[in-house]
Image (cartoon, rainbow, N blue to C red):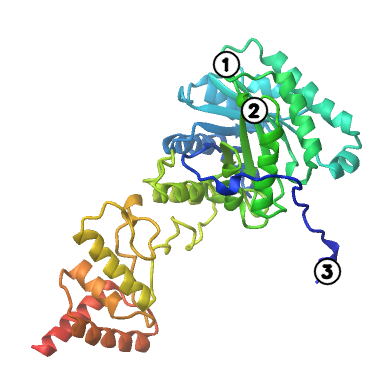
Amino acid sequence: MQFKKYRQYPVVKNITRKWTNNQINEAPIYCSVDLRDGNQALVNPLTIEQKVAYFNCLVKMGFKHIEVSYPSASDTDFYFTRKLIEENLVPDDVFIQVLIPAKKEWIQKSVEAMRGVKNGIFHLYNPTNEFQRRVVFNKSDKEIIDMAVEGIQYLKELTQEFEGNIVYEYTPESFSQTNLEFALKICNEVIKTVKPTIEKKMIINLPNTLEACMPNIYADRIEWMCNHLHNKDALIVSVHPHNDRGTAIASAELAVLAGANRVEGTLFGNGERAGNLDLITFAFNIYSQGINPKLNLSFIDEVKDFFEKITQIKTHIRHPYVGEMIFTAFSGGHQDAIKKGMDFYRKQNCQEWNVPYLPIDPKDINRDYEKIIRINSQSGKGGVRFIISEFFGEELSNNQAIELGNIIKEETDKLKRELSKEEIIKLYKKSKKKRV
């Protein structure tokens, strides 16, 4: 293990952090980048027809910012953008966004793709970290800043006659590997060029392009930037966390605590390498705290089925909130607690959900209770009680539950598999006849 060839990510020094005392009290603005960042990570990128279907799904879920394309990268992206605009497929309250590298010919093509847009976000970026400046682009710090400033200026010139509602977004593309002082300098120069106002804000997007630091350090970086960006009241601070360390959701949550009010990500975290921020889990985390998630999550199983079919990516059975088995308990102790918790919740007509081992009520996403408790050799009397009560309508005494539990254990050990509720009910009926 050659761990010595890696160096530790630098901490943010001399910061009086406030984010540690904050709470998330409302959902941020969500920007889906499924059709651009997610699409470019698929083995088989989406066709225009598939993109339209995906776009409609995102709209139905309630996304108001949707990055639809990289028009200068492919004809498919360009013509998909034109189709959305020319066929009036974008609702009046939805902004479509295009990603644009800071090169004049690509800016021009991207503007052509968006001509006639009602609500458009022009997302300009250029890499800013020291290694890329020196090795990839062979440009000085000033030349990299000039690239961003000249790019945004040219973009403004080409869009000044647009009649729609236009928002400019700038990303120092490798922010996670960029010295903070340089990231601040280039962002402030772009802000100075755009001249945003409180009525007409611009977006500064600060991505974990490659997730390389712990979530708390990312939060420190976001808070530091928020404290030093010019004209902060006229800005929407956005984050775009990737999942290379497996902590994109935590990074996004802490970034919101630190001052970000917009997050970019994808459904179920699809994206290059280890993926993007999973907006589904992020939104459900907010929902589970009693806060309006600002997305319609009630038909999430339908969304999951659509996603799997169109992307050919299977959702893991343990995926938070939506995996096939995320509400399932085999453990006897867990099953007993769930049974007693469910009984209490119903009998007391509780207004707040507080059932052990179930972070949200499965009914909230149109799941029934059939898969909550499944019976195998690890299960106990609590699980058996739940099955008979829930699906046969009889309440077992403690002695009856123990007796049936022993019968079930013998059967599962013999068959070496779990039993269906039908098999359990059949065994229960058989045991009742014997008692009679």
Q: Quadrant of residue 47?
A: top right
Mark 3 vs mark 2, CA separation in Å? 43 Å
- Residue 227 lies, in percent from the top left, at 68, 35
Task: Report helix, strand or loop for mark 3.
Answer: loop
Quarter occupied by residue 376: bottom left
Closest to the camera, between mark 3 and mark 1, is 3
Is the residue marked by circle 3 packed among few (<14), some (14-19), or many (20+) residues within 10 Å? Answer: few
> Relative to residue 148, is residue 65 drawn left or right?
left
Identify the amino acid type marked 2.
Answer: Lys
Q: Which mark is residue 2?
A: 3
Q: Is residue 141 left or right of residue 236?
A: right
Which residue type carries mark 3?
Gln
For the residue carrying disc 2, how many other residues have a C-alpha within 10 Å: few (<14), some (14-19), or many (20+)? some
Tell me the kind of residue under disc 1. Answer: Gly
Residue 255 lies left or right of residue 379; in this view the side is right
Label 1: how many Cα within 10 Å (few below 14, some 14–19, many 20+): some
Residue 130 visible (yes or no): yes
Establish if 49 lies above or below 402: above
- Element at label 2: helix
- Residues 207 and 24: in front is 24
Q: Nearer the viewer, residue 54 or 280?
A: 280
- Which residue occupies 70% across, 26% down? 230
Residue 106 in sight from this viewpoint:
no
Left or right: where does residue 3 sit relative to residue 346?
right
Check disc 1 and report the residue beneath it.
116
